[in-house]
Image (tube, rainbow, N blue to C red):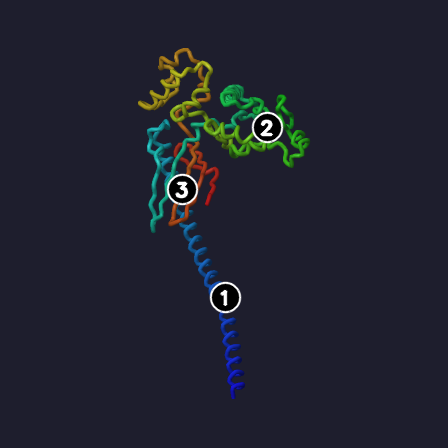
Amino acid sequence: MADVKNHLGNERGAILLLVLAAAAFIIPLVYTGLDQRLFQISQVDNNLQWQTAWRNSQSMLSQTSVILAYDGATTQSDNLLEMWTHPIPLRGLNGAMTTAIIEDGQRYWNINSLLDGAGKLDSQRYKIYKSILLSLDIPVGLLDSLRDWLDKDNIPHGPDGAENEFYRREKIYYGAGNAPLTNLAELQLLRGWRPEYIERLRPYFRAWPPGVNDNLNINTASCRVLSNLSPELSVAGIDAIIRRRAEKPFTSLNELTVLPELNGIHLPMNLLGVSSNIFYILSTSRQDHMAGRMRALIFRDKGKITIKWLRWEP
């Protein structure tokens, strides 16, 4: 009888161990399935938030375009005292918040305009660009490789020029672009251009396609950009421009000539202006814990708006 009881006890113990083992195997599966389901729900929620942020940024782009179109149709100059220079907020549903900043592209030089509309070197801009590079301790020979990248021919210019033969000789898989840059970061593709040189240039240059009036706007250009307009331009002359436009923005280039500090100074008047056609839009949209940025380049012709490119950065 004792042996039977011991045998039954052993069987019950074995069965209990089997049940516990099965439970130990099933429970992780249950939790794994639950975790996967929760992950899928989280993904759906994140996608919905991204879509909401994207739609809010699109709405903001439409709003900023309307502001710029109205401004272009009703004013003859663009300056830092106008409404579009301030951040523009847009509050959406469920706590969504979108903010846009409009930046005047023509407060910078267009690096692609080193060449004129005929594809030839613009001597006036070359002198200004050279002055900027010298002031930033950047080798001026890099303008040769930039020129070769922009022009259509395959003839290197200057000792630092670089066409297809140079890139092949250096075992670089691409040749000269023979086209305008789309952004300053592309300068890294050119012979001799280092990342630190590009960062030094950012306060002075942007890159956009040719085919539009891209004269420098004296109402919005920074002090350091203005400082390279002419070797004759003194600090007092730059201060006079800044003070005047802060009190009363320029509506005509002729108004520069009445400033005593600029008397006798030769400025590149044909490269300057008091209005702008090119604008950058940076829109930041937040929905709960998600945030995304939209960047756009806008060309404006009076009241007509054209979006040249648009980039979404989650």
Characterize the local packing of mark 2: few (<14), some (14-19) or many (20 or more) Cα atoms within 10 angstroms.
some
Q: Choose the circle earlier in sequence order: 2 or 1.
A: 1
As drawn, the residue found furthest toward the bottom would be: 1
Q: Which residue is mark 1?
A: 29
Q: Can residue 180 be seen in this snapshot?
A: no
* Foreground tag (2 vs 1): 1
Q: Position of residue 85 (x, y in %)?
A: 36, 32
Classify residue 153 by image quadrant: top right
Q: What is the C-alpha distance between the residues marked 2 and 1?
A: 58 Å
Q: Choose the circle earlier in sequence order: 1 or 3.
A: 1
Q: Which residue is mark 2?
A: 192
Q: What is the C-alpha distance between the residues marked 1 and 3?
A: 41 Å
Q: Position of residue 199 (x, y in %)?
A: 50, 30
Left or right of 301 in this view: 12: right
Which residue does the image show at 43% across and 15% down from the upper left?
233
Q: Choose the circle earlier in sequence order: 2 or 3.
A: 2
Under circle 2, the secondary element is loop
From the viewer's perspective, is residue 53 above or below residue 124? below
